[in-house]
């Protein structure tokens, strides 16, 4: 296939590009500036800003893709407002460009910690937490807008990723979460998180080329409380034992159920964060 990959130079995008090329696909990677890295990986490079509707439309049309893949984020500064903007406005512009070019399938990155509160890991049919408090609501509504926009395509797959860890993420020595741990600001809590290694996230994106239309949780097999994963992470990055919080679990921090991805044939290399975090480098 011929794939137009928005966010190709990001942590997931680079891995997706490499895997797509290895599987014999042609990749046109969208970036805002020239990217020798993508060229070395075997991709063509399309230079445009996702907020420039005309330039983006021209880039997609020129690429003549079979599939448009959305791996766009804006997290380099830890700005949730910027990330919400790219989920809403960036997705709108990308979807319009794809639809105008006659693209049949869109695959898009979402997240799996936006479900409404509950007592067990959430499957894909659990509603999004649209009635959450103001601080969380901007994130949830931006995700809902992204997913609604993507559904305008004739065929679509929304990948609700777990928390990314592995090389180039916040969960590495020297990364954002490691700095919190070393500063004593990372507590072990009752909140439940579902993780996914970045290599497994990339493999799911490639597999999604052939998945049926729908939403899929892409996370490992073991949702974990902070009481479980935080000490393992701290040990892996050489940080002190974390303090333990006695606060009750936040209702929406429930983790996610990955059985649908498993049923579709996705097999993570790292089925548990226990092994993945222990191997953190």
Image: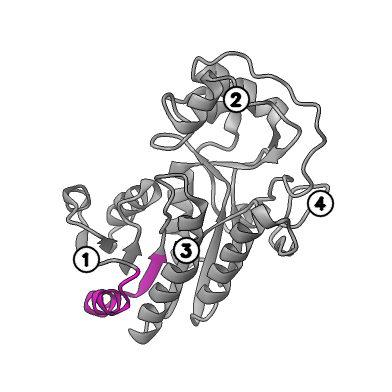
Residue occupying the point 79% across, 53% down: 117
Q: Nearer the viewer, mark 3 or mark 4?
A: 3
Residue occupying the point 21% across, 78% down: 62
Q: Name the residue under label 3.
A: 85
Residue 63 rendering spot, x and y as whole percentages: 24, 74
Q: What stretch is highlighted in magenta?
A: 51-69
Residue 17 rendering spot, x and y as whole percentages: 31, 54
* N-term-proximal mark, 1 vs 4: 1
216 vs 62, nearest the viewer: 62
Q: How far apart are marks 1 and 2 (CA)?
A: 41 Å
Q: Name the residue under label 2.
A: 185
Query: Circle 1 sits in a helix, a strand or a loop, which is it?
Result: strand
Q: Distance between the residues labelled 1 and 3?
A: 22 Å
Residue 132 rendering spot, x and y as whole percentages: 73, 58
Residue 212 visible in the current orientation:
no
* N-term-proximal mark, 1 vs 3: 1
Residue 46: mark: 1
- Judged from this view, the residue extending furthest toward the front is 134
**The stretch drawn in magenta includes residue 215:** no
Residue 118: mark: 4
Residue 71 visible in the current orientation:
yes
Quadrant where the image shows the N terminus: bottom left
């Amino acid at each position: 296939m011929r794939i137009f990959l928005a966010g190709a130079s990001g942590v997931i995008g680079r891995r997706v590009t490499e895997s797509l090329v290895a599987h014999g696909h042609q990749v046109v990677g969208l970036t805002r500036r020239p990217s020798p890295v993508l060229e070395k990986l075997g991709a063509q490079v399309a230079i445009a800003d996702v907020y420039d509707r005309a330039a983006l439309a021209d880039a997609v049309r020129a690429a003549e893709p079979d599939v448009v893949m959305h791996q766009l984020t804006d997290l380099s500064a830890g700005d949730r407002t910027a990330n919400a903007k790219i989920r809403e406005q960036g997705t709108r512009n990308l979807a319009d460009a794809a639809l105008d070019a006659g693209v049949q399938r869109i695959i898009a990155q979402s997240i799996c910690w936006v479900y409404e509160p509950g007592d067990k890991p959430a499957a894909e049919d659990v509603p999004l937490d649209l009635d959450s408090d103001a601080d969380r609501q901007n994130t949830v509504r931006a995700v809902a807008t992204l997913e609604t926009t993507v559904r305008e395509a004739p065929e679509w797959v929304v990948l609700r990723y777990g928390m990314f860890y592995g090389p180039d993420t916040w969960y590495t020595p020297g990364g954002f979460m490691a700095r919190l741990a070393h500063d004593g600001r990372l507590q072990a809590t009752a909140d439940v998180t579902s993780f996914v290694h970045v290599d497994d996230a990339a493999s799911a994106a490639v597999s999604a080329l052939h998945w049926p239309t729908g939403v899929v949780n892409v996370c490992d097999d073991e949702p974990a409380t902070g009481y479980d994963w935080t000490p393992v992470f701290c040990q892996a990055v050489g940080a002190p034992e974390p303090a333990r919080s006695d606060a009750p679990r936040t209702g929406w921090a429930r983790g996610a159920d990955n059985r649908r991805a498993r049923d579709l044939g996705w097999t993570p290399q790292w089925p548990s964060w226990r092994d993945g975090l222990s191997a953190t480098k």
